[in-house]
Amino acid sequence: MKVTVIDCSVSGHRETYYKQFAQTWAGMGHETSLIAPDGKGVQETVAFQPVSALPLLPLPAGKPLQKRLVVLRNAVIRLRNLYRLRRSLQRLKPDLVFFACLDDMLPTLAPLWLFNLLLPYQWSGLLVQSALPPYHRGMPDTRPFLRSKNCVGVGILNEYSAKDLETFQRHILLFPDFADLSAPATNYPLLRKLKEKARGRKVISLLGSINFRKGIKLLLESIPLLPKDEYFFLIAGKSSLTAQQENDLRAFGESRNNCLFSLEKIPDESCFNALIAESDLIFAAYKQFTGSSNLLTKAAAFRKPVIVSRGLCMGRRVEQYGTGQTTGEDNAGECSAAIRSLCTETRMDIQAFARYAHEHEVEKLITCFNQISKHIQ
């Protein structure tokens, strides 16, 4: 079978996804091609072609009218991208098109017949953010396009969203939220700086893309509630904050001797894993985040407890597996108490980490892909 894997994102974890998807399909014996931003590190049997898709525009915060205009512009960009891909696919003639992130590639405003015309191939893929608000007919939404006659199955990472999606697609598959578990980079300069500054204190880390949805405000409010001589706080990753927000964050960090804030992109997964390995606790109490995160998989693999927001996918998993504690999104008192408990009082069950890591092993993709293959005509 000929399979073409497609993605248009340059973000680190998305790169992990599309490369692993391509390698898994190829490893199963299928003739595989990859249309994406980067093909480095993918096995030679995977034919690589750079993607020519236009990037979607970011939605402006707090500007409803501008947001509507951007949504409409993005709807047009999505259709143009599908048209561009159609020309590439005509040369490849795949039996299956597999989208590493359906969220960015499916239309939001278009008749279904037009989508079927632009993508006249059997297709599947991963819907990364699958826990979406209630569907309203006529509103911009990717879900109606899951009903396409050419769709042979949709993968999700959030098991709690499966039932709601079955209205749009019968074949819903739970994918493992796997992660790149490369050996930690021991020569990473930020790692050396962290060790020098922390000096044996408990390290609490917020890692990855840095924005206020990551719970930065909650963390900053919690830091003064904990003893400086016992706890050290690391924030590291590429910033999407405004210049003023970055200045405020740096000023906070520089005013204390138990903070290290680096707002530069973490170079690669080995460096990312080095910071996790050096941490005592991973902070992931995101605001109103309904999805899964492979940060939980990384933390479990390195046997590091996590603190997450209560109630949604990540919170329910942490409570189910016992890999950390949950907190209210705006409760610094509860958050600081959870940090203290996880770092000094709670004895973690090592088997809890092992169970979670096993549940999200990359090898489970093979079972999912075999299920998809059964529906290809």
Image (tube, helix red, strand yellow):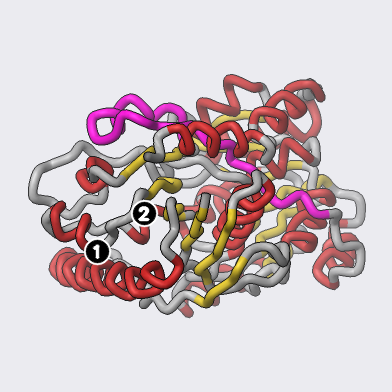
* Residue shown at 35% from the left, 38% from the top: 131
Residue 128 seen in the current view: no
Q: From the viewer's side, name the closer residue of 316 and 263.
A: 316
- Predominant SS along the magenta part: loop
Rounded to the nearest whole Å, what is the CA distance between mark 2 and mark 1? 17 Å
Q: Nearer the viewer, mark 2 or mark 1?
A: 1
Q: Which residue is mark 1?
A: 118
- Taking the image as shown, residue 152 lies to the left or right of residue 1, namely left
Q: Secondary structure at mark 1?
A: helix
Which residues fall within the magenta stretch?
158-182
Residue 50 seen in the current view: yes
The quadrant of the image that shows the C terminus is: top left
Q: Which residue is mark 2?
A: 103
Res. 148 image quadrant = top left
The tally of labels here is 2
Q: Does the magenta-highlighted stretch encompass residue 308?
A: no
Nearer-N-terminus badge (2/1): 2
Q: From the viewer's side, name the closer residue of 296 and 243.
A: 296
* Residue shown at 80% from the left, 31% from the top: 344
> Is residue 142 placed above or below 36 in the rendered structure?
above
* Residue shown at 85% from the left, 54% from the top: 183
Q: From the viewer's side, name the closer residue of 127 and 187.
A: 127
